[in-house]
Image (spheres, helix red, strand yellow):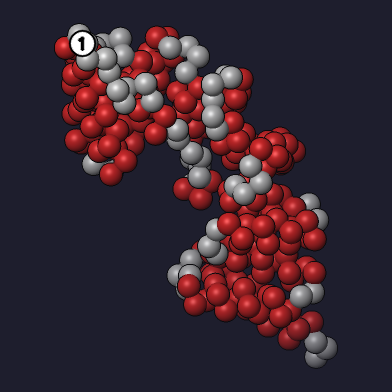
Amino acid sequence: MIGSRSLLVFALVALLAGCAGSPERVIDKQQVAETNLRLGVGYLQQGRIDAALEKMQKALAAKPDYARAHSAIALVYQRLGKYAEAEHHFEEALELQPDDAATHNNFGVFLCQQRRFDAAEKHFLKAIESPNYKTPAQAYENLGVCAMAKPDLDEAEKYFRRALQIDPRMPVSLLNMAQISLARQRYLSGRAYLQRYFEVAPPTARSLWLGIQVETALGAQDVVDDYIRQLSRHFPDSDEMAQLEAMEKKARKEPRESSPR
């Protein structure tokens, strides 16, 4: 499974598009479905999963062929860990509305989290191909995150670069490009991506740990010390802090082991 740090992003707000307003005279069932969907998405955004499920079920009871309601309830079932139900509703949504870019993106996120990478890529690319899709950079970033999980650094770098060409201020893409740069020993590039990251997002344990590794490789001890202070102060219980302590312990031990007896 992909960890929460990967930050694959759902297009949740897009589910409300097209149901924000209705003509004065509408079929009652359509109005009931739209109202319940709007309420359900609001509850989902608040983390009230049971309430969201109830409203979306009512929306589909009123209008079983409502593609947006199928797409929305799929996200609820995914949150609940009911993956078969989630996949069923994603497929229903796309059968009813094959060109819906937000649903393709969300289904791609779902498939990537199930480690079905090839299928996920197809849906992300379909979202990007849609002329009405307003956030192609997000789908490219999701593609990059998915490629990192394979792992395929070449593919990941390609997609993160495309995301940043569209929107140069995407924190997840910047941080992952710093990670790729570190893995490929392109330390100056790693520094540059981290500097851009810190301009648009607050420090995290992961970003500070990356900074420690990059600046250590570049011999910038003052910067390393600053990152270490921030990591120990703000994230003392993080995995990254444990890795730093293990690294420092190893560094203290090695000179003694290598000294002549």
For the question of whether residue 116 can be seen, the reply is no
- Residue 1, compared with residue 224, is above or below; it is above
Q: Which residue is nearer to you in this view: 206 or 194?
A: 194
Quarter that holds the C terminus = bottom right
Q: Quadrant of residue 157?
A: top right
Residue 184: percent from left, percent from top: 78, 52
Residue 16 vertical placement versus 60 (above, below): below
Image coords of residue 190 (percent x, y): 74, 57
* Residue 136: quarter of image: top right
Q: Secondary structure at mark 1?
A: loop
Which amino acid, by three-letter code, is at mark 1? Answer: Arg
Q: Is residue 67 visible?
A: yes
- Residue found 55% across the figure and 58% down from its top: 201
The residue under label 1 is 25
- In front: 4, or 59? 59
67 relative position to 123: left or right? left
Say which quarter of the image contains residue 117: top right
Name above or below for residue 17 compared with residue 62.
Answer: below
Residue visible at 68% across and 75% down in the picture: 224
Percent across and percent down for residue 227 are: 62, 73
